[in-house]
Image (spheres, grey):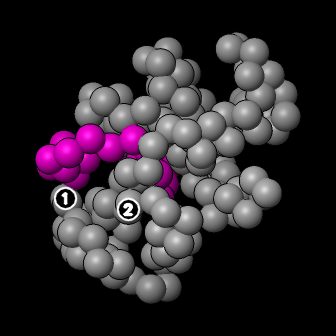
């Protein structure tokens, strides 16, 4: 991963500052890419944590299933309202394309989950003006906010 915890990036902001900003002030509508009704998948549990902390989750999965009471959509482009954060639960090979879609729909931030890393996508997304975090989990980070 090219951006390490507590180090200043090209903007002079640390990753910890970016995490805090995304979780507290970027907005409350989170598209969760890869979220389905499969309770055994990490996305299912993380989405529940996001809801408990006041975030509106929007499931994004080819099956477009309703999850945690929220209507699902097959793609980011299908969501008919603004999305603040795109939380990505797909493999690293697919994640860059999702980040590019997040830029196209006007999201304010992209969050790649644990194990999801794409340095090129990070560079493109940051160049487009979005905040971005890789290889971290908001369900772990939220309680750390204090």
Give the side of residue 137 with respect to residue 9, left or right. left
What residue would you read off at disc 1? Answer: 74
The quarter of the displayed image where residue 10 is located:
top right
Question: Which percent across, then down, holds residue 15?
Answer: 73, 34
| Crowding at mark 1 (Cα within 10 Å: few <14, some 14-19, many 20+) | some
Q: Residues within 10 Å of mark 2 (few under 14, many from 20)?
A: many
Residue that mark 2 sits on: 57
Region rendered in magenta: 75-96
Q: Residue at x 38, y 62 (%)?
A: 57
First reached walking from the N terminus: tag 2 or tag 1: 2
Q: Residue at 79% across / 57% down in the picture? A: 146
Q: Is residue 134 above or below residue 8?
A: below
Residue 92 highlighted magenta (yes or no): yes
Image quarter (top left, top right, bottom left or bottom right) of the N terminus? top right
Name the secondary structure under disc 1: loop
Of all residues, the one furthest to the bottom in this rendering is 39
- The residue that appears at 65% across and 49% down in the rendered structure is 135
Instruction: Please provide percent x and percent y for residue 41.
Output: 49, 77
Asked which secondary structure carries label 2, the reply is strand
Q: Position of residue 88 (x, y in %)?
A: 46, 52
Residue placed most toward the observer, 19 or 118: 19
Q: CA distance from mark 2 to mark 1?
A: 14 Å
Q: Residue 83: within the magenta?
A: yes
Task: Name the residue nearer the viewer: 52 or 101.
Answer: 52
Disc 2 vs disc 1: which is toward the camera? 2
- Residue at 38% x, 60% y is 56
The percent coordinates of residue 71 (x first, y second) are 21, 69
Horizontal relation, residue 75 to residue 6: left or right? left
């Amino acid at each position: 991963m090219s951006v390490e915890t507590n180090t200043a990036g090209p903007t002079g902001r640390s990753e910890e500052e970016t995490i805090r900003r995304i979780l507290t002030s970027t907005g409350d509508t989170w598209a969760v890419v890869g979220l389905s009704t499969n309770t055994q998948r990490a996305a299912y549990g993380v989405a529940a944590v996001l809801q408990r902390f006041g975030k509106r989750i929007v499931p994004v999965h080819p099956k477009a299933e309703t999850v945690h009471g929220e209507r699902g959509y097959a793609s980011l482009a299908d969501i008919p309202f603004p999305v603040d954060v795109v939380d990505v639960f797909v493999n690293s090979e697919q994640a860059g394309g999702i980040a590019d879609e997040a830029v196209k729909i006007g999201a304010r931030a992209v969050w790649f989950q644990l194990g999801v890393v794409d340095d090129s996508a990070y560079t493109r997304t940051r160049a487009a003006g979005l905040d971005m975090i890789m290889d971290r989990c908001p369900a772990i980070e939220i309680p750390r906010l204090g």
